Image (cartoon, helix red, strand yellow):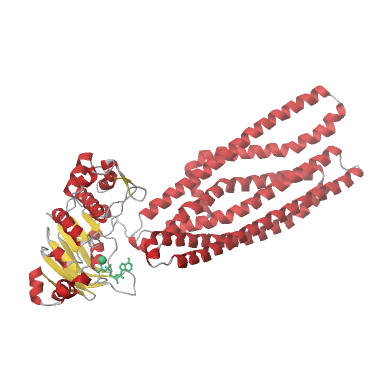
Amino acid sequence: MLKQFFSYYKPHKRLFLIDFFSAIFVALLELAFPVAVQSFIDRLLPQENWGLIATVSILLFVVYLLSTFLQYIVSYLGHKLGINIETDMREQLFTHVQRQSFTFFDNTKTGHIMSRITNDLFDIGELAHHGPEDAFISIMTFTGAFSIMFYVNPTLALIALVMVPFLIALVTYCNIAMNKAWHNMYGRIADVNGRVEDAVSGVRVVQSFTNEDFEINRFKTDNNLFRKAKIGAYRVMAATHSSIYMMTRLLTLLVLVVGAWLSYKNQLTAGELVSFVLYTNVLIKPIDKVSALLELYPKGMAGFKRFQELIAQEPEIKDKEDAMSVKKLIGDITFDHVSFSYDQHKSVLNDISLNIRPGETVAFVGPSGAGKTTICSLIPRFYDIDDGSISIDHINIRDMTKKSLRSQIGIVQQDVFLFNGTVSENIAYGRRNATEEEIRVAAHKAHLDEVIQNLPHGYNTQIGERGLKLSGGQKQRLAIARTFLKNPPILILDEATSALDTETERIIQKSLTELAENRTTLVIAHRLATIRDADRIIVVTNDGIAEQGSYDELLAKNGIFAHLHNIQFDPVTNGSLMS
Ligand code: ADP
Ligand code: MG
């Protein structure tokens, strides 16, 4: 895993090297300082040469200026490095998520993706910056300081060294505890995010069932679990810091006491004693740093592990290596013995065969859950089938690139997603290089032009979550305009007007009929009145395709369709069912 982690440094090699060598230089200066102090006290002071003392002082000052500058470089470039890596990873993650297949989104909570893209990556960035640099510098200063101490006075150096295993044991113990605590905390925050996501996107349902208190209580429970986990993590952190602090002060005290004794015995000069105390501080610093790293490492690595898990998930639906980019299809769609299930346990489509001729309008009707939407989702390859084949113009859709296949299919659904942006931008989502004139023509075809003219800023009016709200009918028109712009040979209308009132539906229907002209069209309709003019109607039930034929043929047949028809148009039940 570390190897994969380090691969992210590659694009920033130069930055890393400058930062790294500056850090080494700072560490060297730090190592040299106590030696300088020692010579100052032991050699320079007794000479009482004030001119020389002044010169040396100025020299020290210059060295300090240099060290300060280098520390600035290290801090600035180090963070820059971390932020760059974090940005790269975030981009990679977003790109990856954006390319995932529908199954991924069926099974992954938005909150979890969000917390990976934000929280996790902050920690990874911090680790990327501090990790290798601090680890290396710590080892270097530690061995450096110890070697010098040993050279000056082996006895005292060894006494100081005796403390080190205790420190290491303590730090390792803390590391394990901390690792567990952070991991726990991350799980809990993901739960909290998931709850927020649910309650916010489902707020209409929550409020219509007046389940606010229920949701608040569920949230409280999760929020409290997170609180406990976070407090727990910080308690472990506080305990770690204070016990390490205590150990280090103990070390300083030990050196001071033993050093004083040695100096009394004339085995240590005053300068040496001072430099020893200074060196114990140099010795402690890396241990401090390592302990900070130990706090950062599990956090960052836990995040990186989750990042990797996500990145490792290959999109389920991928282009074959020799997939071809299809140009303009005419829309001759064939399902040949198609079977499909979302998961192994429950088959949704079983051995479905059907052909839709170019330019034909085929309506799918039947009970909800029968698999109408599923049939339509298979054509743009949102899901791959388990058995059989689907071809368009006699080319298996698996032999086409996803991009070229999907560019041939327009879909208008019940829910229209509006992006934050202007009306114009939202229409242009259908074909992003469209000119203003083309956008206007598309809007006009969708009978939306007039509505837009009356908006406060016309085509430049902001809509979407952060802007103006459009009515259901207006949203549908916008979706239709988008599809006009895209101008695909194949059109799927999945209950496009089911959410609208009958009057609005009737008006939108006209735009839809115009949109369907000269395209192979699959219509899923709830209200049978809207599919009177379909070339063919296919009745789908849980057992597959039950009947097909024209409106009148199916009525004459007096089967399932006729039954559905009678329910909808029966004047007695009409009122309740047409609602
Ligand atoms: P229809 O459009 O005819 O109402 P669908 O095609 O939406 O029916 O659903 C057919 C069956 O597949 C239903 O049993 C439904 O529960 C199931 N289903 C639909 N979408 C998914 C999905 N994304 N994941 C798992 N099961 C699904
Ligand atoms: Mg459906």
Q: Is residue 52 left or right of residue 526?
A: right
Q: Is residue 260 visible?
A: yes
Q: Nearer the viewer, residue 153 or 223?
A: 223
In x, y percent, where is residue 194? 45, 61
- Residue ranking furthest to the top: 51
Q: Quadrant of residue 346?
A: bottom left
Q: Is residue 501 left or right of residue 81?
A: left
In x, y percent, where is residue 260? 87, 45
What residue sits 49% from the left and 63% below the top? 191
Vertical comparison of 527 with 118: above or below: below
What residue sits 17% from the left and 56% below the top? 507
Q: Is residue 4 visible?
A: no
Q: Is residue 573 left or right of residue 261?
A: left
Vertical comparison of 508 with 59: above or below: below
What residue sits 50% from the left and 58% below the top? 305
Question: Which quarter of the image is occupied by the C terminus?
Answer: bottom left
In x, y percent, where is residue 327? 19, 50
What residue sits 62% from the left and 51% below the top? 293
